Image (cartoon, helix red, strand yellow):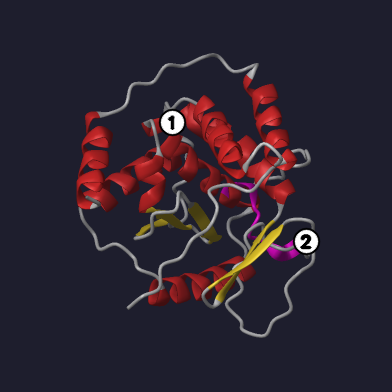
């Protein structure tokens, strides 16, 4: 039986840095990104409970493609997978490999909130966080090589099965900021990211100062964004009902 895994939806934001230059604008994905991402993706696909292709995975793919295509990010391959796990998590490993848990869709109160999960991870990709040409670690350092020493930084680290997860809070903010643009261009409500951040902070407790800092930064950015009311699609509501029924 494949193991079930848990993780976080987003890392807490504790500092601010301008968005890094888009590595794809400079010629595409890096060779080291492709090698590491493909090894890591293969390990995930071999070990984790990936949902078979069906109506739900098709829906997730359409939402991701809407974000990718409207921002004209579709030149390089993108691969979207749904993990059978109830934690509200989405993550990427580079080279266009995107993973999202069923729990992210189940926990989303609106379609824009679910899109925010995907946009954040797509943001990591388009900002260039998986290109190691500058010698830095990945924001999510999924290390496919057992025995390798993990980089030291002021973020979070955890081990999920045989894969090591590292989250850099500075890069998380960069992905957040790019994701706000992606959501707006795709026709979703960018405020959904703030809504998700508030929920995550509330669930971690009032003492989580880093979570409060992330919420405050998103509030500051969103002050200059025009309010957009976006209705949920009937498909989103129907799929949530199907998931809820399957868990009864």
Where is residue 92? Give x, y as percent.
52, 57
Q: Which range is magenta?
A: 126-134
Decide if residue 227 is on the left or right side of residue 22.
left
Label 1 sits on a secondary structure element that is: helix
Callout count: 2
Question: Where residue 134 is drawn, which disc sits there?
Answer: 2
Give yes or no for contact between labels 2 and 1 (Cβ–Cβ under 8 Å): no
**Could you tell me which residue is drawn at 42 percent across and 26 percent down?**
187
Q: Nearer the viewer, residue 95 or 159?
A: 159
Residue at image position (76%, 62%) is 136
The residue most toward the top is 226
Question: Would residue 162 appear left or right of 51 to someone viewing this image?
Answer: right
Quarter of the view holding residue 242: top left
As rendered, which of 99 and 87 lies closer to the eye? 87
Q: What distance separates the C-alpha of mark 2 from that of mark 1? A: 31 Å
Q: Using the image, determine if residue 5 lies above or below residue 12.
A: below
Q: Which residue is mark 1?
A: 186
Residue at 44% over, 34% down: 113
Is residue 45 depicted above or below 105 in this figure?
below
Q: Is residue 19 visible?
A: no
Q: Earlier in the sequence, mark 2 or mark 1?
A: 2
Residue 212: image x %, image y %?
69, 34
Q: Residue at x 48, y 51 (%)?
A: 89
Q: Which mark is residue 215?
A: none
Graded by Cα atoms within 10 Å as few (under 14), some (14 to 19) or many (20 or more), the crowding at tag 1 reads many
Instruction: Let me know if residue 10 is in the magenta part.
Output: no
């Amino acid at each position: 039986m494949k193991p079930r895994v848990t993780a976080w939806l987003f890392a807490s934001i504790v500092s601010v840095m301008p968005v890094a230059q888009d590595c794809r604008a400079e010629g595409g994905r890096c060779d080291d990104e492709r090698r590491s991402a493909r090894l890591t993706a293969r390990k995930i696909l071999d070990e984790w409970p990936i949902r078979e292709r069906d109506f739900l995975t098709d829906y997730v793919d359409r939402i991701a493609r809407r974000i990718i295509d409207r921002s004209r990010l579709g030149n390089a391959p993108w691969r979207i997978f749904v993990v059978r796990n109830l934690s509200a998590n989405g993550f990427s490993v580079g080279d266009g490999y995107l993973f999202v848990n069923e729990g992210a869709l189940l926990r989303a109160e609106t379609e824009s909130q679910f899109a925010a999960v995907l946009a954040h991870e797509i943001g990591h990709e388009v900002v260039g966080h998986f290109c190691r040409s500058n010698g830095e670690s990945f924001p999510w350092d999924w290390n496919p090589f057992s025995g390798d020493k993990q980089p030291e930084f002021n973020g979070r680290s955890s081990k999920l099965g045989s894969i090591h997860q590292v989250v850099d809070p500075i890069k998380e903010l960069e992905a957040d900021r790019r994701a706000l643009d992606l959501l707006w261009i795709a026709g979703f409500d960018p405020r959904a990211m703030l809504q998700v951040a508030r929920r995550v902070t509330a669930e971690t407790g009032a003492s989580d100062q880093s979570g409060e800092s992330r919420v405050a930064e998103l509030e500051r950015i969103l002050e200059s964004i025009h309010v957009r009311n976006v209705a949920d699609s009937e498909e989103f509501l129907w799929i949530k009902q199907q998931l809820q029924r399957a868990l009864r």
